[in-house]
Image: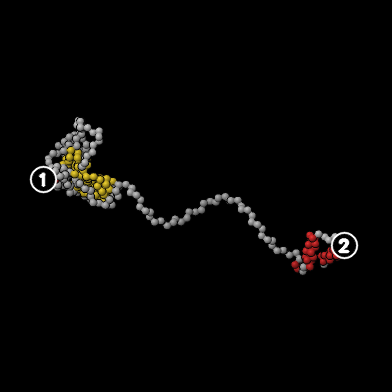
Amino acid sequence: MKKILQVLGCMFLLVGAASYGETPKSNIEQAKARRLARQSTDPPSQCGCTGRDGRDGLPGRDGRDGEEGDPGPYGVPGIPGPPGPAGADGGGVTYIRWGRTTCPEVEGTEMIYEGIMAGSWYDHPGGGANYLCLPKTAMYHPEATTANIRRSNLYGTEYQITGGQALVAHHDHNAPCAVCDVSTRSRKIMIPGTYECPSGWTVEYSGWLMSAHDSGHKGRTEFVCVDKDPEDIAGLYANTNGALLYPVEVVCTGIPCPPYDDRKELSCVVCTR
């Protein structure tokens, strides 16, 4: 009631001032007076109530980046992807097929060249100890001479087969050879004493294990696997010796017999993988 009487008194003074020609108050003061009058006429139950929420302010600036947290746990492994495309050929291997003019008809095997089997004289202590596969066509460097002195001789290689042995029909014939390339496999092994390859290996060819004679001859050679069905070089049949090939048989001294048999020519096989 006291607040109402104060408001009425203010209004009376304003009216009185206006009637006596006093200068009106500023617009701001008039607005304050009107607001005060409205508040005084509100019902008593609404006096002192909280007003409406103000309008939302503008967004503030982004805060500074926080410190990096600890790594999280590993996720579950994903499903394996499909196999990738096949890569380029990663290797290859070469070998010599002794006793034949062609390479085996095995997938991935091709012939590099056909040649002539050669080696050192069977009864000379010097020279090479290995057999060679000479190309059928020779090519000499321009610097080669015909001095024909202080040399190591190379001879054709003859089969030396005693009557009753395997391959007797090839006795005193000269042996050919073929150099073969395997592009799809990268390992090669010659296994004596068998004509089968281990599981997972490819049989290139099987044959007879042969070498120089071990008694009465001074020369030594390597053991080679001559094809089971050898060929001869046409036109060279003669007992001229040179490098020689004999079948190989075991001696039952330090070699168990059986399974080995000291009466039989040993087999062999060339395998790739």
Residue visible at 23% across and 50% down? Answer: 104
Q: Is residue 146 visible?
A: yes
Q: Residue furthest right?
A: 20
Residue 198: x %, y % from top left: 26, 50
The residue carrying pointer 1 sits among few (fewer than 14), some (14 to 19) or many (20 or more) residues within 10 Å by Cα, namely few
| Mark whose residue sits in front, 1 or 2 | 2
User: Does dot 2 land on a helix, a strand or a loop?
Assistant: loop
Residue at disc 1, secondary structure:
loop
Is the N terminus in the top left, top right, bottom left or bottom right quadrant? bottom right
Residue 11 in the image: state x and y as whole percent. Answer: 84, 65
Q: Which residue is mark 1?
A: 163
Residue beneath the point at 79% across and 64% down? 34
CA gap between label 1 and label 2 equals 162 Å
Q: Is residue 215 left or right of residue 59?
A: left
Where does residue 32 sit, x and y in percent of width and height? 79, 61
Residue 37 vs residue 188: left or right?
right
Q: Which residue is mark 2?
A: 21
Which of these two is toward me, 2 or 172?
172
On the rendered structure, is 8 left or right of 221?
A: right
The answer to whether residue 36 is above or below residue 257 is below
* Nearer-N-terminus badge (1/2): 2
Locate residue 15: give its quadrant. bottom right
Q: Quadrant of residue 40?
A: bottom right
User: Which three-letter amino acid code belongs to the residue tagged 1?
Assistant: Gly
Q: Do callouts 1 and 2 mark residues in contact (Cβ within 8 Å)?
A: no
The amino acid type found where label 2 is placed reads Gly
- Give the answer, above or below, for where 160 lies relative to 145: below
